Image (cartoon, rainbow, N blue to C red):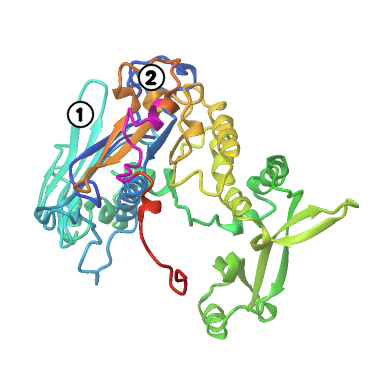
Amino acid sequence: MLIFFAVENWLSFRDRVEFSMAKSKERQHIERLPYLDKYKIHILPIAAIYGGNASGKTNLFHALNFGRRLVIRGTQPDQEEIPVQPFLLDTDCQEKPCCFEFEILSDEDICYRFGFAVTRKQVIKEYLTEISKQNERCLYHRELDKMEWHPKYKNDKFLSYVFQGTRKNQLFLTNSISQKVEFFRDVYNWFKNNLVLIAPDTRFNYSVLLDEKRPVYNRMKDVLPLLDTGISDLGSKESEIENTFFFPEELKIRLQEEMPENISTQVIGPKNKRFVITKEKGKLKAKELIAYHSDIQGNKIAFDISQESDGTQRVIDLLPAFLNLTKDNPKKVYIIDELNRSLHPLLSRQLLESYLNTCLPQSRCQLLFTTHDIFLMEQSILRRDEMWLLERNNHGVSSLFSLSDYHKVRYDKDIRKSYLQGRFGGIPKFLLSGMLDSIDYKEEGHHDT
């Protein structure tokens, strides 16, 4: 689970902003909040992040994604620079480090604080702390090329050797895993296996949906017809790659030479056509997901997924995440940027309510999302501490705050109206009234006569 996240000097976040999934003092919907008995705290299972266009919602998503990628992928030996993106509207920030801090609950129900500060050239600081109810113990603390160890690890010569071999532009956590150090794998595995980020253009791996042995395949077949997509069933069609017209010859040759036997890869072609390519007995085969619709006679008619609406394709890409969230305690943290993109507000609401109905004190999964959908801004669905607002000031600096910070907001208040009236912030600031009507222009090729 994600308990806390902070970022500083990243894109529009010049100053440190903090995001907490620990519950506040309010009592609404407490029956569905995960409870950590070991720490005697409740953690929120969901968070909705609102804000005007360019307020910083996607920047927050990118910050979380950067942290994950730097941990699990690291930097390559021939890669000189870390791809940081500091705040650009203040020259003082250009050479300052970008700072990230995570508090997480691992699969072993242990809470850790992991943080790092990086510039383009190097890791300035990195630390890992284990948190118990009574105290905290720092497992390691790195400052440039210096490392301080917890007494438990201080005399471990192999750990010191691994640190000495850690490049200046590489996280020690990442290198320790590559060197088969097991002490910190619990933290690394959380980033790799538990934290899942879904961007607006993220495409679900169709190789999973095309495997009829996987539970998600049958669950998708059962649920899609219930969502008013017009899809009555799912299936697939297979052909040899030579008979699939859109594949460039160069790609065919490369796949033939480089793909191992019985390994699948997803290829996205024109018009969002998606194929899963598998090499079997030296031959490349292309498998494509098919959606079936029923005609007026009740016959099943096959459609390419690319023929479906943008909304239906978005549902197909998002639904596996929601199905996973509602199964037995998956311990996943899904973060979705622009949840409402191409989805009807009622469908978004139904998906969220279906998830929340499965949340219990023993749950260990979470859903965080950015959205403009104010129909979800309702206290019968979300607690006030589960609603966050992002706002950008005149200097281009984003700030982040929770609706629970407004202590005078009653539990029975229609907060959508107050939000749209600008009482909480987090909405676009229009400088001109009727600004489009006031602009005197002549369209190219059109002149007054």
Callout 2, which amino acid? Asp
Residue interval drawn in magenta: 418-432
Residue 132 in the image: above or below residue 279: above
Residue 305 in the image: above or below residue 408: below
Residue beneath disc 2 = 37
Instruction: Looking at the picture, tell me which residue is in the foreground, 416 or 284.
Output: 416
- Residue 420 falls inside the magenta stretch: yes
Q: Secondary structure at mark 2?
A: loop
Q: Which mark is residue 136?
A: 1
Quick one: label 2 or label 1, which is nearer the N terminus?
2
- Residue 228 falls inside the magenta stretch: no
Q: Left of 257 or right of it: where is 18?
A: left
Residue at the image point whose x is 73% and y is 50% from the top: 231
Callout 1, which amino acid? Glu
Instruction: Looking at the picture, tell me which residue is in the foreground, 324 or 178.
Output: 324
What is the chief secondary structure element of the magenta stretch?
Answer: loop
Residue 230: x and y, percent? 73, 48
